Amino acid sequence: MVRTLRLSELQAAVKAEVQEISGPSAFRSRMLALGITPRSPVQILRRMPMGGPIEIEVRGTRLALRIKDAEQITVTVRA
Amino acid sequence: MRVALAGNPNVGKTTLFNALTGRHQEVANWPGTTVDYVTGRLPTHAGEALELVDLPGTYALEAYSQEERVTRDFLLQQPHDAVIVVVDASRLERNLYLVLELLEFTPRVVVALNMMDAAARDGLQVDAKRMSELLGVAVVPTVASRSTGLKRLIAAVRQVARQPAASVPASAVPYPDEVRRELIAPLTARLATLQGLGYRPEWAALQLLQGEDDVRSAVAALPRGSEAIALSRVLLAGEEGGRLRGGAMLQAARVASVDARGRQAELTLLLADSRYDLIAAILRASSRRRLRWRRDASEDLDRLLLHPFWGYLVMAGVFSAGFWLAFVASAPLSERVDRLLVGMGGAVAAWLAQAGAPAFLRSLVLAGVFPGVGAVLSFVPYMAVFFAVYQLLQDSGYMARASLLVDRFMQLIGLHGKGFFALVSAYGCNVPAMTATRVMENPRDRLLANLVIPFIPCNARLGVMAVVTAAFFPGAAGAVAMIGLILISLATLTLVAALYRRTILPTDPAPLVLELPRYHWPSWRTVLLATWHRVWLFLSRIWWFLIWATIAIWALTYFPAGQPLDHSYAGMIGQWLTQLVGRHFGFDWRLMIAILFGFVAKETTLSTLGVLYGSGSGYLSLSHALTQAMPPLVAFTYLVVYMLYVPCLSTVVQMRRESGAWSWAALGVAVNVGVAFAVGLLIERLGELLGLAP
Ligand SMILES: Nc1nc2c(ncn2[C@@H]2O[C@H](COP(=O)(O)OP(=O)(O)O)[C@@H](O)[C@H]2O)c(=O)[nH]1
Ligand SMILES: [Mg+2]
């Protein structure tokens, strides 16, 4: 079964796959250059306390994103 | 021959650059920006002279930050013979994206496969030869931090610079056939017919189809260029237009009803996808990951350094140590420089007196020129230490972690985590703190930080505040007063930042993206060279202003000649300011003059007050004189104003430099002074209401 959710809602250490990126075009092209594209595997490594940014691993690099930005990215998880 | 170094941030460009050029380097400012870049020459033993340019790091050719803009503008507009793209061998998947983009833009590319040691430690084996075959350009393994592979790299660069452009295939990326056939090919063919197009036609076609503004305006400026742009619209609408010419084409573009933005976005996604597909194929064929026995040391460190409790504790420790080194440990050195110059000034003045020079000349030397030079030079020790610490934190990869830890809290004042170090270091000195705001990509964020940094009391101000509070509020009350003052400055900063955000500097929709690079041992050479560049840039730009300003202030206090201070021009200004503003606060003319003079350098405030109150600047006599002259409420109000208004001339000059325009600096100063007095007035009235006035 495949579940679709926002990247911000993903649990840490669960392997997911990027589905879609919404938001302004500057945001989307930035994500593309950083390797966040549809079908790329992604995983949350840790969350900063008190609703701070999340650290993700994507295409072999580690990035931090704010929750607000991570909400623009939908991912799918295979259960 | 001119060669550019490009690559993602933190891949070792600067290390490679330093290893190649040694000390043959020059820093310059990119015209119209606050971005500095470094050029260097290769020691020439054999072959043509080679100039190297260390470009700011970039994730893609498309610019997002001001730094990336500089890189893009350089590559698009400045003549160069080759580009070295530096990639991190241990993070190839994302790094190769830029390589593919650059390969579409220019055939003269050499890939420096850097950090081969780190990749090997990860158990990653990369076959450079195979990768070179697949990419169609030279790929040279290097370890910049150990100067390995440099000879082969330069040999490859020389070869690529010589080879004729036509011998390299246009694009290696397997874009979907229909995109090629229906969009790229017809537009490329059309662009190839244009006279004076400085770019490869296929690259320009891809940019136009994605709605890239720079390229569009460059093409529009060419004869028949607007037809090519029209064709891109027609093609995006899914119609055929390859054979249309002139007015018919423009007409077709007008009627082509198309959601151009939507199509462009779709296409961008498709192209990016194809690039990543190719990258995956290349990596499958040219790299092998062996089973990893050793654990990832970076991850182990992160478990501690990003820990919700220990992480903050370590950060407090690291920053305190850095702060101590930069502002406390270096203080004796600054003082010595200062004293040396004062001594020299005295000696020169004495010599002038013997030679029978007029009094004003002696005074000019003693109170104008030498203190001015001293003000510039006494910056050097803590600037140097500060920038070294800053570079060390940056290069080791720790700064990114610290930014991540504090981002949540920095959002409260509308800034992101990367600005934290700048704001904290402003408690030491506002001037280098403004330079430290450059880590923020977004120009608006950076501007905001520069505008609010002066509200943070620096070392010099804190010193004066400590003396005055101790005089008026003995014992524990002094600590309470001091903490009160600092809280007032924080609250003011938060409010003013929010105000700027609401009005002229709204938040960009741009995201916070912070890459967390692997931890590295910083290389001393890189740290020292970067420190030297920064100190030099600062000095070379600021000395002129500071010396003139000190001389101007000297002239105001000295003339009309022979009058006591309160009858000098400065005294008159002080009197006038007292009438205008001071009296609402209970400040007499002496306090107003001290505020005015504090503008040159706040360190001098105590001695100015000492002179004005005729007490000398000895602590006991001064505090006695002050407590006699005014009630505690006035003193506290004075400190509030003193703490908040523009710290000193150097900050203003620096604000101009970092914001790029005098108008921003003027606005910053105006808001700063206005807010300082407004908050002062508020405190004074509140105090009166609470019955604290005598
Ligand atoms: N292990 C290793 N570290 C390197 C290598 N090249 C650079 N570094 C380190 O990587 C960090 C970032 O390098 P820097 O030259 O500042 O990267 P830039 O942002 O691309 O200019 C520094 O701490 C360097 O010492 C390398 O080949 N191997
Ligand atoms: Mg660099």
Image: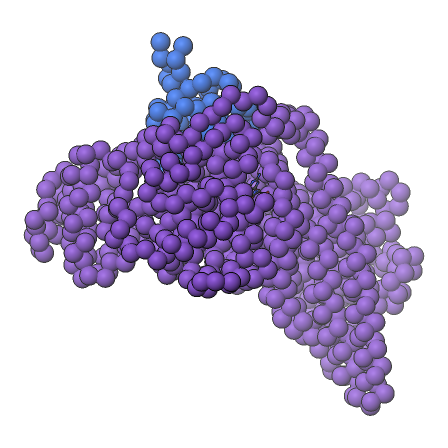
Chain colours: A blue, B purple
Left or right relative to B242: residue B176: right
Image quadrant occupied by the N terminus of chain B: bottom left
Left or right relative to B548: residue B621: right
Closer-to-camera residue (B114/B237): B114
Count all numbered tags in the image, as a single digit.
0
In percent of the image, x 36 and y 32: which residue is there? Answer: B282
Furthest residue toward front: B46
Closer-to-camera residue (B654/B79): B79
Residue B366 coordinates in the image, percent (x, y): 79, 76
Quadrant location, ligand no. 1 = top right
Furthest residue toward bottom: B356
Relative to B279, say whether B149 is above or below.
below
Corner quadrant of residue B599 = bottom right
In percent of the image, x 42 and y 38: which residue is there? Answer: B128
Relative to B172, say whether B200 is above or below.
below
Residue B151 coordinates in the image, percent (x, y): 49, 51
In percent of the image, x 35 and y 9: which residue is there? Answer: A1
Relative to B468, say whether B89 is above or below.
above
Left or right relative to B236: residue B504: right
Residue B323 coordinates in the image, percent (x, y): 72, 45
Q: Is residue B79 visible?
A: yes
Q: Is residue B462 visible?
A: no
Residue B413 coordinates in the image, percent (x, y): 57, 40
In percent of the image, x 65 and y 26: which residue is there? Answer: B304
Relative to B167, say whether B307 is above or below.
above
Closer-to-camera residue (B671/A10): A10
